[in-house]
Image (cartoon, grey):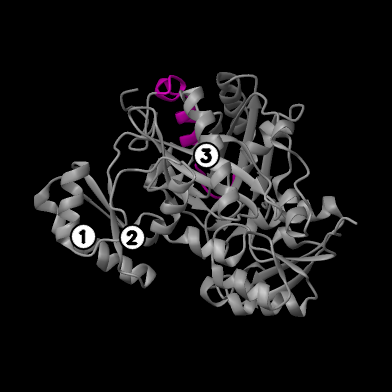
Amino acid sequence: MAPKCFHRLFIANRGEVAARVGRACASMGITPVFGVSEADRDGPWTSGHETVVLGPARSAQSYLDPVRVVQAARQAGCTALHPGWGFLAENPLLAGLCESHGVTFIGPPAHVMRLMGKKIPAKHAMAAAGVRLIPGSPGVLADVDEARGVADEVGYPVLIKAESGGGGRGMRIARGPEELATAVSEAEREAQAAFGDPRVYLEKLIEGGRHVEIQLMADRYGNAVHLGERDCTVQRNHQKLIEESPAPGLDPEERDRTFAAAVRATQQIGYVGAGTMEFLLDEDGNLRFMEMNTRLQVEHCVSEMRSGIDLVAEQIRVAAGHRLSFTQDDVRLEGHAIECRINAEDPSDEFRPHPGVISRWAVPADEGGDVRVDTHVVSGYEVPPFYDSLLCKVITRGPDRDAACDRMIAALGELVCEGVPTTVPMHRAILGSRAFRENRYDTRVIPGWPPGEAD
């Protein structure tokens, strides 16, 4: 007899992702219960639903407190918890607390999360499955002398990275031997301050690379599939701005080889649920592993648009003990999809966040399933100053890349947001630039922005 799904599911997040998980629950007949801070207790995504106040507005006392979150889920009578992304989504303590208190965590087991959360063990696991790695130290660095030896072997420039790092913290570049000792000591200090772990390792710095990631889904029975790749090269300060699929300019043989290795690695580590492996495409066209995100990604919608598969619903089914509802042969990736993340920021003023009241809000109309807007915003919504300023994600699909881009430009032209500035002008400039259309950019530049620069 197939296992049943959940009756009540706790959503330990806010804003757009909380709304997204709530929609999946509604489609499955599951009652969502939203955990909110004091600042979000009247959030539009909670309208008509049960809520539990986790604590004050500050994340550390609400969304980032794993004990409060699990306690709230238990008190609300929920048998499952979805962490969304950000906050505690990749925190093995939360997953472990859920496991020990009879709440099903919608994500991988805690021990798998711990494994992939440490960069060196993760790299070893990937190498064992045939995934290509960025050349570098085999483990954490013992001292500067070891760093010098590895750097001489792989060649400068090199990147010193925190073993427990993320978000660009605990990273330093050394372009020559004279910079190495300072880079190591600075990276160690920042890693200790940010993560409580001063250990660092060394990698060859790949400059001018492309950022490519592979969407994966697995169940507890050893079945794993990929849903294609996404290009996330357009970034600012390590924060993604635009994502698309398929990745333009990627060699088909390298794509297929990496797909197979990524699926194999997913199975070997005992992964369960939705996950994403991130790669850097080097100048020789090789995809080299960077890290695995053990959660649902913001940009999962891009893969959903091409595959027609609801990844959040599949996450929930898999967590409830079901086998994957599809095989690799069932996955059909159609057309080209692109996503723009729209934030309440002023790109002309160094991307300064702008909390405030949105007096008028309207989204573009769908065009036969080719335009999608994921949002929690309504007219009258007040953007709080405490959290990420994401307002919505606009996703479009077309038969090819140019058509998807043209459709996105039109959709962004129909998006109405009055009361706070948004990043829409920047996105339209990028999408209309020759550099973006001709695929002439890498992670070091934002094509078409600022306006007026050479294209």
Q: Residue type at mark 3?
A: Ala
Q: Residues within 10 Å of mark 1 (few under 14, many from 20)?
A: many
Q: Position of residue 165 (x, y in %)?
A: 38, 60
The quarter of the picture where the C terminus appears is top left
Q: Residues within 10 Å of mark 3 (few under 14, many from 20)?
A: some
- The residue at which mark 1 appears reads as 184
Q: Quadrant of residue 321?
A: bottom right
Q: Is residue 19 visible?
A: yes
Task: State the residue at coordinates (63%, 35%).
Answer: 395
User: Badges 2 and 1: C-beta atoms under 8 Å apart?
Assistant: no
Q: Residue type at mark 2?
A: Ala
Q: Position of residue 114 (x, y in %)?
A: 50, 65
User: Badges 1 and 3: C-beta atoms under 8 Å apart?
Assistant: no
Instruction: Find numbered disc 1 in the image and state the secondary structure of the residue it sits on.
Output: helix
Q: Is residue 438 above or below residue 69?
A: above
Instruction: Give the alpha-carbon distance from disc 1 to disc 3, as whole Å.
Output: 32 Å
The quarter of the picture where the N terminus appears is bottom right
Task: State the residue at coordinates (46%, 23%).
Answer: 249
Q: Is residue 136 magenta?
A: no
Q: Is residue 400 above or below residue 415?
A: above
Q: What segment is highlighted magenta in the picture?
A: 417-439
Along the viewing direction, whichever of 251 and 58 lies nearer the viewer: 251
Along the viewing direction, whichever of 93 and 126 lies nearer the viewer: 126
Q: Is residue 13 shown left or right of residue 191?
A: right
- The residue at which mark 2 appears reads as 162
Q: Position of residue 344 (x, y in %)?
A: 52, 50
Instruction: Find numbered disc 3 in the image and state the secondary structure of the residue it sits on.
Output: helix
Q: Position of residue 404 (x, y in %)?
A: 60, 24
